[in-house]
Amino acid sequence: MNPFATDPSPTTETERTTDGFDGWDAFDPDHVPEPGPFLEGHAVLTGDDHAAFHRLTRALFEERGVYDATFGYNLARLNLDRRHPEAGFRYAVDADEPAVLRAEFTPTTEFCPAADALIKGAFRAWNGLSSCHEYDLVRVRVHPSHQQADALDASLERLEHSIRETGSIPNSPSE
């Protein structure tokens, strides 16, 4: 748990859903962002498949401290926050590489100043703890609605290239 969290993510599957958040077992297409262009043509996860990977995401983000400082909770909880039904992560299995999962992050605003830290934290959590899931690589992109999507995506491509070349995630931001 992040000691700076103001609203810690519940750790049980029986979490109340009356507090403005959907439950971790739920998949409500009206409360998650529409899949964007990075997921187009790939097998988008829905229903139980989406919910299962998202529960795993919560655990990995908790392990690595991927928290949204604006809201004070584990970033995975954004998908469940009914105040922001157009924000969060969507996932798809890559059509050409089934061992690769694609994740597209839609921030709450097009100018989200924390987007860089959030997507890199997500990338590092999923790929640094890859023994916890069935994918060799989780590719991450930002929805193009973000004002700096191209630059952010380029930095994620560099991280992907590095992990494919070396088998490890670089530690330095310049890498």
Image (cartoon, grey):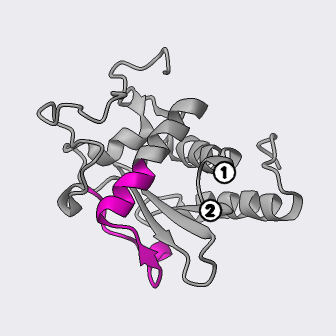
Local secondary structure at mark 1: helix
Q: Type of residue at label 2?
A: Tyr
Q: Is residue 49 above or below residue 107?
A: below
Q: Position of residue 10 (x, y in %)?
A: 33, 27
The verdict on residue 47 being magenta is yes
Q: Which residues are the magenta region?
A: 32-54
* Mark before the other along the chain sequence, 2 or 1: 1
Q: Is residue 133 above or below residue 44?
A: above
Local secondary structure at mark 2: loop
In the picture, measured across the screen, residue 5 lies left or right of residue 140, that is left
**Viewer-side residue, 72 vs 80:** 80
Q: Type of residue at label 1?
A: Ser
**Viewer-side residue, 149 vs 156:** 156
In the picture, measured across the screen, residue 114 lies left or right of residue 11, that is right
Q: Which residue is mark 2?
A: 135
Q: Is residue 160 above or below residue 133?
A: below
How many other residues sit within 10 Å of disc 2, few (<14), some (14-19) or many (≥20)? some
Any mark on residue 167, and which?
none
Q: Which residue occupies 39% across, 29% down? A: 73
- Residue lying furthest top: 3
How many other residues sit within 10 Å of disc 1, few (<14), some (14-19) or many (≥20)? some
Determine contact: label 2, label 1, CB under 8 Å: yes
Marks 2 and 1, how far apart at CA: 7 Å
Q: Which residue is mark 1?
A: 130
